[in-house]
Amino acid sequence: MSQSYTCVILGAGAAGMMCAAHAAARGGRVLVLDHARAPGEKIRISGGGRCNFTNLHAGPGNFLSENPHFAKSALARYTQWDFLDLVARHGIAWHEKTLGQLFCDGSAREIVAMLVAEMRRAGADLRLQTAATDVEKTPAGFALTLSTGERVKSETLVLATGGKSIPKMGASDFAHMVARQFGHRITDTRPALVPLTLSGSPLEGIAPLAGLATPARVSTGGDGTGGVSFDEALLVTHRGLSGPAILQISSYWREGQEIAIDLLPGSDAGAVLRDLRAGMGRKGVAGALAKLLPARLAAHVAARAGLSCNMADLSDTRLAGLAAALTDWRLTPSGTEGYRTAEVTLGGIATDDLDARSMESRLVPGLYAIGEAVDVTGWLGGFNFQWAWSSGWAAGTAIATRGAGQGAMPG
């Protein structure tokens, strides 16, 4: 006789565990399956092991989706403040870094332990090193074949296995395959929050700068297509460009497109350079720029502008050219480092056939999709975790309400 459940959740990541804790809250029988040896592996490695678990400024404007309005309901009903209340109840100390990013003082494992404790308190079962190999729709719900050879039945099924980013952790597009099996459309997917690569002469040109980090404004789409920009750190690598500003812009960049880099974000470059010319006229251009930038970068800018003279020798026209070299450095990346290093997958299960309030499929009653599996992708800085908490909560509470008092299906 097969085991029967109110809900089976595929994936013991951030969204899946959050969903389980709420889906089981009213007595429903909930099973969480994951092929990994431990739950929450992406949580464990995030934020340098301290988990950037949410952002004080999280809101719909921090997410990319075909439908920019889809995330509003879940984000408004389970906010960053709600998650902070949960963190406080478990006595987890945290601190704020830049731009509203919240991290554990201790270890990301505390967040994993908190979610596991919440699932256990609600009565959800967690089975690791176990995957679903086949999923079928039945008149009463769903039937699943497990990697152990067992068969289980469930009234509801939640797709929470994420996307394809970081395959060495076992990431796959399984949720997308199941959704497609049931008639759902999958939007174009691509690596996001990922370093950009350069090749040929652009890579050779920045090779001497490898390892250098500096504040910058990185922009894309500045050709009249409604560009976006981010003011954060930029890091030069031996493959190309990384750092928070680059990871952010990678979600918007497309192959063949230029990016523009401003090395003096928020400054009037012309005024700054005129002051340098007046005060450091006998200095060479590279030496004077070293007052504003790391020395290696200053030398690179001067060389790129073709200026080996002293600051005092610069005419207003040449000074304007130097300002452009500082504030409008154009590069065309050759690609990205791919899913191997991407923090998230951009795109996923299209939102047009999902209910924004419950995350339930409009095509298949009882089927839900949450977290990274869905076409909702957050910025760098805790936003994707907040989407996991909000969407997991939305589906979990909907399932608990749906199944309250009904119990599991008969075996």
Image: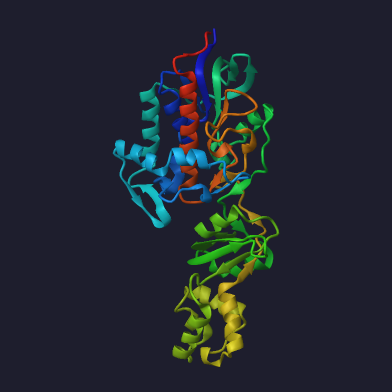
Work out whether 256 lies above or below 356. Answer: below
Viewer can see residue 388: no
Viewer can see residue 228: yes
Answer left or right for 333 relative to 162.
Answer: right
Q: Nearer the viewer, residue 187 or 150?
A: 187
- Residue at image position (50%, 44%) is 384
Residue 330's image quarter? bottom right
Q: How many marks?
A: 0
Residue 322's image quarter? bottom right
Residue 17's image quarter? top left
Q: Position of residue 36 (x, y in %)?
A: 50, 31
Residue with the most extreme left position: 91
What colouring style does the render use?
A: rainbow
Q: Position of residue 60 (x, y in %)?
A: 51, 47
- Residue at image position (64%, 64%) is 222
Work out whether 97 lies above or below 321. Answer: above
Work out whether 274 lies above or below 202. Answer: below
Q: Position of residue 94 (x, y in %)?
A: 33, 47
- Residue at image position (50%, 16%) is 5
Question: In which quadrant of the rendered image does the N terminus lie?
Answer: top right
Q: Nearer the viewer, residue 222 or 31?
A: 222
Q: Position of residue 101 (x, y in %)?
A: 41, 51
